[in-house]
Image: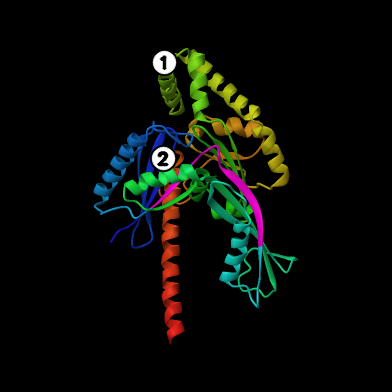
Amino acid sequence: MRDLYFGLDLGHHEIKLSVLEEDNFGKFIIHNQSIKNEYLKGGEILEIESLVDLLENLIYNTINSFNINKINELTVCLNLPNFQNYTQKGYTFIENNVTKNDITKAINTARTSLIINNQEILLEESIKFILDNNQEIRDPLGFAGRRLDVEVFFISCQKNILDKIRHIFNELKINNIKFCPSFYAASKICLNKKDKEIGVGILDLGAEITTLAIFQYGKLIHYKSFNFGGENLTQDLAIYLKADVEEAEKIKIDFFNNHLIKDKNKNIKIKKFIEKKIKDYFERDNLKQYLKEIKSYYKLPSGIILTGSFAKIIDLDNLLKNLFDIHLKLCKDELKIFEKDEDILKYSASAGCALITRENNYESKNDWFKKIKDFFSFRY
């Protein structure tokens, strides 16, 4: 039986679906497809019946292509302006040595102490553990002590948004849905273990939202979103060229793909305009100043990794490198699963979702085997 794992990126312009296939030797093969999205903007579902039909066709085609009965598990990523983040502390008292159950209890107390109204937790990351109020430990499992403290980083989203999306997939007979932020899903593909260990940022340039996330010691430790993206550039380009939005979008995409128009002078003007607007976006929203503060607080030896559809702008990495005065480069396929380099920016989030589905699947299997083992150990 084929091992297939599914991930979906509910993007502003496109919905991307990735299917991660794992062979008997543990090698990954990725299958990607995308469809235009006109029915989900900024977390608001504009036409729910049309969105259901769109997703139904996508799911139906995928099921037929892989000759399977249904999709049992799906991880869905979103990039919304109303994500909230919190850092919360929790603790528990231990008898002798720290067990997995003790770690879970400490994290649970951090979660239950959160005061969030109409929010659902998308992500939780244990940043650090402290044993007996003085010893900071990355992994406390097995250590002797009396009290275990933990600091946990949470990201949440409005519950009604997730419930609406969950309901749509339930209508499509997919009941096991997990949600996560798009930048976190993309980090699974675009960041390697070494970079995440020593310190790296990922700058996710989406259609509506730009997000800067910081990873260190293998963990997500900080993030912030800014309300601008590729959509802003399309609208400003339409005004500049005195064109409609559809025409401006086409010119932008052609420009991103280096399909330049015949008029060389116009190409130069468009390029200068795009560079100026990008500088304006980053300076207007204080991202430049914010990044300067981040660099003084967090060490980022691996610099900043660019991802997202907006990152396809020609020479954007060099432009931002000079603007931010930091080592910065386009993301690459750390897992070596994409055949085409241009697919990495487009499908990194959906492919990362598929990888998260695989991780959750393996975790569930291990929990099940552990329960069986504990059951027989108890009986015999």
| Residue kind at label 2, given as amino acid type | Asp
Work out whether residue 318 can be spotted: yes
Q: Nearer the viewer, residue 24 or 96?
A: 96
Position above or below: 288 against 8: above
Kindly identify which residue carries mark 1. 262
The span shown in magenta is: 74-90
Q: Secondary structure at mark 1?
A: loop
Kindly identify which residue carries mark 2. 343
| Residue kind at label 1, given as amino acid type | Lys
Q: Secondary structure at mark 2?
A: helix
Q: How far across and how far down the image is residue 243, in percent? A: 44, 14
Q: In the rendered view, does 242 fall on the left or right side of 320? A: left
Position above or below: 259 against 306: above
- Ranked by sequence position, the earlier of labels 1 and 2 is 1
Which residue sits at x=65%, y=54%? 88
Which residue sits at x=29%, y=53%? 70
Which residue sits at x=62%, y=61%? 109
